Every structure is written in structure tokens, then in C-alpha cells.
């Protein structure tokens, strides 16, 4: 299994930010030019970009559309986009704008029919975002927690043609505490869909551990990439090894 790294560009008020455990009042601003950040990541050699419209995740509809379009125009690197995509019209509009993969999170719990329809309409271009707090899936920008477990939710889409599962351990997100390797690998072994790790990557040892665990297709890099704890070239070489 190939292993892909996804540098994260989280958007709040048109700026590039990182949150701690998803708390919007704990945002650290890392830049005011999302397009320039996207171009920089592409120039460093990253083959994908992971973009999240944080305001959109809370609002239930796109809220940083201008910034996303600027990112799409700044680099040919494929973009996977999440946040505020709750209906087919929004999904289709982003596909037409040039997004390569949609990440559907809250909709996976609240409107699974839409996720299945989107996966049929855009084969191989829909991912399910599963964000878990103590094993239970959170929705609405992590403001609500459901009774569904991460594995239960992932298995519901095993036959839907979903391209990937992006699994976030909320307790670790933005905390530089290390990825939850055990839970991510367990999910990867439980479902027939590639699983991408998210939340807590603090250094090269996280990439090394995820690769060693097997059953994991990639990792999203956030705060550690912005503050220099992870050096891009070293990370990419390790991922490709």
C-alpha cells in the first residue's frame, strides 16, 4: 500500500489557521494567504492538499469559498476539501470548480443517502471524514457527539464506492500528542476502504509508526508542519520509502 502525506490548510475567516481539539476559539493563525500556502506546499513536493472550510463545517454550507477557489487556482496539486458540503448541489459545484476529492463528515451520520449518492455520482472522488471523541463520532464541526462508533460508521459505507476514510482522533488534533496509531490501524483492518490518519502528528516518528502498523494509506500533517517539527523533504522521503 502506498502512503500519501496531506498537508492541511484549515480556513477560518479567509485565513490559514490551526485549532486545538477543534475549538474555534483556540485558533492559531499561520497565514493570511491560503493560495500562497498551497503553492508553497506543492513546491515542497507534496502531491495532495487537504483543505477544510472550518466556518463552513459549523455553518453547514461553504463559508470560505473565495479562499478555496484561490487555492485551486494557485497549484495543479489535487485538493481534497471538507467542511459544509451537505447537499448534491454544493458537491457538484465544488467538483466543477476543480476539487479532486470531497470529504463528507457530518452528512455521513445525518444523511448517509446523500453520501452514497455522491459516491455514485463522483466515482473514486468522495471520502468520508470520521471524527471521533472517545471512539464516538462527532458532527457539526465537532460540536455534537453521536452514539455511533467510528468502525460502525465506516462499515456502513463499505459497499458505497467511497475512495477513503479520513479518521481523526479529536482529543489529539492540534495537540502535537502523536497520532492514535492503534485506533487508526484497527479501523484500517476493519474496513475495505483506505484509511487516512488525522490528528496529532508531531514528528517523523508518527509517519514511521503508521507505516509500520500497516492498513493505513496516509497521514494529514498540520501544526507540526507549520511550526517546523516536521521537515517536508524528510517526511516525503520517509513516506515514499
Image: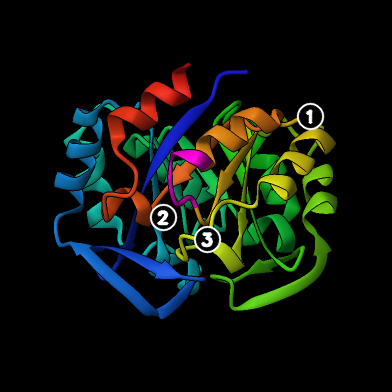
Instruction: Please report contact status of discs 2 and 1: CB closer than 8 Å, yes or no.
Output: no
Taking 179 as reference, is 184 left or right?
right
In the picture of the structure, the residue carrying the numbered disc 1 is 192
The correct choice, above or below, for 137 with respect to 164 in the image is below
In the picture of the structure, the residue carrying the numbered disc 3 is 177
Q: CA separation, marks 2 and 1?
A: 25 Å
Q: CA separation, marks 2 and 3?
A: 21 Å
* Residue 14 in view (yes/no): no
Considering depth in this image, is 204 or 138 the residue closer to the camera? 204
Q: Give the image location of residue 2, x and y in percent.
A: 56, 19
In which quarter of the view is residue 238 placed? Answer: top left
Residue that appears at 58% across and 44% down: 197
Q: What secondary structure predominates along the stretch shown in magenta?
A: loop
Mark 1 secondary-structure assignment: loop
Residue that appears at 45% across and 18% down: 240
In the picture of the structure, the residue carrying the numbered disc 2 is 52
Q: Give the image location of residue 111, x and y in percent.
A: 71, 58
Taking 124 as reference, is 57 left or right?
left
Considering depth in this image, is 145 or 213 the residue closer to the camera? 213
Considering depth in this image, is 211 or 131 the residue closer to the camera? 211
Q: Nearer the viewer, mark 2 or mark 3?
A: 3
Residue that appears at 48% across and 28% down: 4
* Residue 102 in view (yes/no): yes
- The chosen color scheme is rainbow
Q: Earlier in the sequence, mark 2 or mark 3?
A: 2
Q: Which residues are magenta?
A: 201-205
Q: CA separation, marks 1 and 3?
A: 28 Å
| Mark 3 neighbour density, 10 Å: few (under 14) some (14–19) many (20 or more) | some
Mark 2 secondary-structure assignment: strand
Amino acid at each position: 500500500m502506498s502512503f500519501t502525506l496531506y498537508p492541511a490548510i484549515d480556513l477560518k475567516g479567509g485565513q490559514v489557521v490551526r485549532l486545538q481539539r477543534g475549538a474555534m476559539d483556540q485558533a492559531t493563525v499561520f497565514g493570511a494567504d491560503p493560495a500562497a500556502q498551497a503553492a508553497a506546499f506543492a513546491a515542497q513536493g507534496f502531491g495532495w492538499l487537504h483543505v477544510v472550510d472550518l466556518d463552513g463545517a459549523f455553518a453547514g454550507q461553504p463559508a470560505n469559498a473565495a479562499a478555496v477557489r484561490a487555492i485551486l487556482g494557485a497549484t495543479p496539486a489535487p485538493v481534497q476539501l471538507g467542511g459544509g458540503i451537505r447537499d448534491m448541489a454544493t458537491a457538484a459545484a465544488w467538483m466543477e470548480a476543480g476539487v479532486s476529492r470531497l470529504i463528507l463528515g457530518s452528512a455521513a451520520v445525518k444523511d448517509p443517502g446523500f453520501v452514497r449518492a455522491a459516491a455514485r455520482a463522483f466515482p473514486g472522488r468522495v471520502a468520508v471524514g470520521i471524527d471521533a471523541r472517545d471512539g464516538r463520532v462527532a458532527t457539526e464541526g465537532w460540536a455534537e457527539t453521536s452514539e455511533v462508533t467510528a468502525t460502525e460508521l465506516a462499515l456502513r459505507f463499505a459497499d458505497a464506492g467511497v475512495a477513503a476514510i479520513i479518521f481523526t482522533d479529536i482529543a489529539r488534533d492540534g495537540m502535537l500528542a502523536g497520532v492514535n496509531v492503534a485506533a487508526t490501524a484497527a479501523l484500517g483492518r476493519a474496513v475495505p476502504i483506505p484509511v487516512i490518519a488525522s490528528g496529532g502528528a508531531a514528528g517523523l516518528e508518527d509517519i514511521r509508526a503508521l507505516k509500520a502498523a500497516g492498513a493505513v494509506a496516509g497521514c494529514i500533517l498540520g501544526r507540526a508542519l507549520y511550526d517546523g517539527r516536521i521537515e517536508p523533504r524528510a517526511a516525503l522521503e520517509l513516506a515514499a520509502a
